[in-house]
Amino acid sequence: MASRMKNENILVSVVVCTYNRASLLKNCLRSLEKQTADIKLYEIIAVDNNSTDNTKEIIKDFIKNRTNVRTIVEKIQGRSQARNRGWNDAKGKYVAYIDDDAIAESDWIKQIILFVNKNPKINVFGGPYSRFSLKPIPTWIPDNYFILNLGNKIKILNSENEWLSGSNMILSRSVFNRYGGFNTKFGGKGDKIIYGEETELLARLKKNEEPVFYVPSIRIKHLVADNKQSLWWLLKSDFLHSFSTCLIKKPKLNFFRSLLSFILALLLIPIYLVDLKKGVIKRRLYYGLSNIFLSLGQMIESIYSLV
């Protein structure tokens, strides 16, 4: 086998955290195999978060005869735990995260390297993602769902409503060393869906006046899994996003205000269903129910904060 790469050559460590999604991981790794960047400048780290399927075999086969790929097994369950293990073991100056169900554009790593070479003082940045699916996405799901597009120009994210995705986010190791990694209270654990680990970290960085940049040339595609294309999954996701966002940002909400918002959302449902010319029935129903589940997330968080 060829000798391993020297640490001083590595600029970017690409971290792929995975749990029991071997078939999806294989597609992600294939996209990383096709990168046009100089292989001496980056490494790929597959963090196996205690998988029980054939993930180990997929990774082992991918590593074969590749000098810039290695794997780590993180036994403690949790996406944040796995991501933290990734940056702690990374050899590069920058750590680039991509999800195991995402596909990198062929110049993804090259664009990251070009950006850091031109902007060596920027420590936190990321780019957009488009969506793809293994089956046609239902027409009732809005076109702007499951994508991230903040424009076609490089910019600092100043708005409270603008965030990077953990599936296309790059941070310097110096930032992790100064502020710590992902909060392990947040992030999925095994099959359990928990949101907020990226938002919490970015909120912490913004609080410490660490600028966060959006770079449109750093592009990936993210899978819209079959189970995510249901009304119930989207509503549950709205609730969990609302709950975790309130938990992180601590807005000035109280139980009674949240309850009023919930009741108002209930009353507005007929309005969403009456004007069917503006959308198909299921989409209008989703919009109405979404407000309810968002308000419910706020209400539950306000109760949680009082306990």
Image: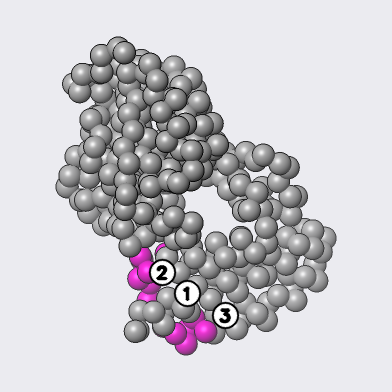
Quadrant where the N terminus sits is top left
Residue occupying the point 67% across, 70% down: 288
Residue occupying the point 55% across, 36% down: 23
Residue linked to disc 2? 246
Can residue 125 be seen by looking at this rendering?
no
Q: Which residues are magenta?
A: 245-259
Residue linked to disc 3? 262
Quadrant where the C terminus sits is bottom left
**CB of mark 1 within 8 Å of CB of mark 3?**
yes
Residue extending furthest toward the right: 277
Return the x and y of residue 156 as percentages of the image width and height: 36, 43
Identified by mark 2, the residue type is Cys
Q: Is residue 257 magenta?
A: yes
Return the x and y of residue 26 as percentages of the image width and height: 51, 32
Q: CA distance from mark 1 to mark 3?
A: 9 Å
Residue occupying the point 42% across, 36% down: 56
SS category of the residue bearing label 1:
helix
SS category of the residue bearing label 3:
helix
Q: CA distance from mark 3 to mark 2?
A: 15 Å
Identified by mark 3, the residue type is Phe
Residue linked to disc 1? 298
Up the image or down, 40 lies above or below 17; here it is above
